[in-house]
Image (tube, rainbow, N blue to C red):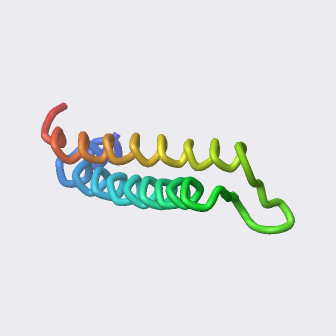
């Protein structure tokens, strides 16, 4: 019970929100950079040999990275802004 209360303090929520924001921005930037490279060169890949994925599957996986990054960034901002709310 005490541990749950510590995790709900404004400072803990703010730190957790900042971590989510940074991780989300990292995923978002990385995936958007790769997708931009795909539209510039026509080639995209995900992973490394021997299990490297190319083409539409790689585009879909980077798209999932964009969605995950956007969600984490939004959740991080929500945690920081509303950290004093119950």
Who is closer to the viewer here, 79 or 2?
79
Residue 2's image quarter?
A: top left
Could you say where residue 11 lies in the image, as x and y percent from the top left? 19, 54
Left or right: residue 86 compared with residue 67: left
Q: Say if 68 sits above or below 16 in the image.
A: above
User: Looking at the image, which residue sits at the far right?
Assistant: 50
User: Looking at the image, which residue sits at the far top?
Assistant: 86
User: Looking at the image, which residue sits at the far left?
Assistant: 84
Who is closer to the viewer here, 81 or 55?
55
At a point 86% along the width and 66% down the height, the residue shown is: 50
Who is closer to the viewer here, 3 or 28?
28
Q: Say if 66 sits above or below 29 in the image.
A: above
User: Looking at the image, which residue sits at the far bottom?
Assistant: 49
Residue 49's image quarter?
A: bottom right
Q: Quadrant of the C terminus?
A: top left
Q: Quadrant of the N terminus?
A: top left
Could you say where residue 15 lies in the image, as x and y percent from the top left? 26, 57
At a point 30% along the width and 47% down the height, the residue shown is: 76
Count of numbered circles in the view: 0
Residue 46's image quarter?
A: bottom right
At a point 28% along the width and 56% down the height, the residue shown is: 18
Could you say where residue 60 lies in the image, as x and y percent from the top left? 63, 42
At a point 44% along the width and 48% down the height, the residue shown is: 69
């Amino acid at each position: 019970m005490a541990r749950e209360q510590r995790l709900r303090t404004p400072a803990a929520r703010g730190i957790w929100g900042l971590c989510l924001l940074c991780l989300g921005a990292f995923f978002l930037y990385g995936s958007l950079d790769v997708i931009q490279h795909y539209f510039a060169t026509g080639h995209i890949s995900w992973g490394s040999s021997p299990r490297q994925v190319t083409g539409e599957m790689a585009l879909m996986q980077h798209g999932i990275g964009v969605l995950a990054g956007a969600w984490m960034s939004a959740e991080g901002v929500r945690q920081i802004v509303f950290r004093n709310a119950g």
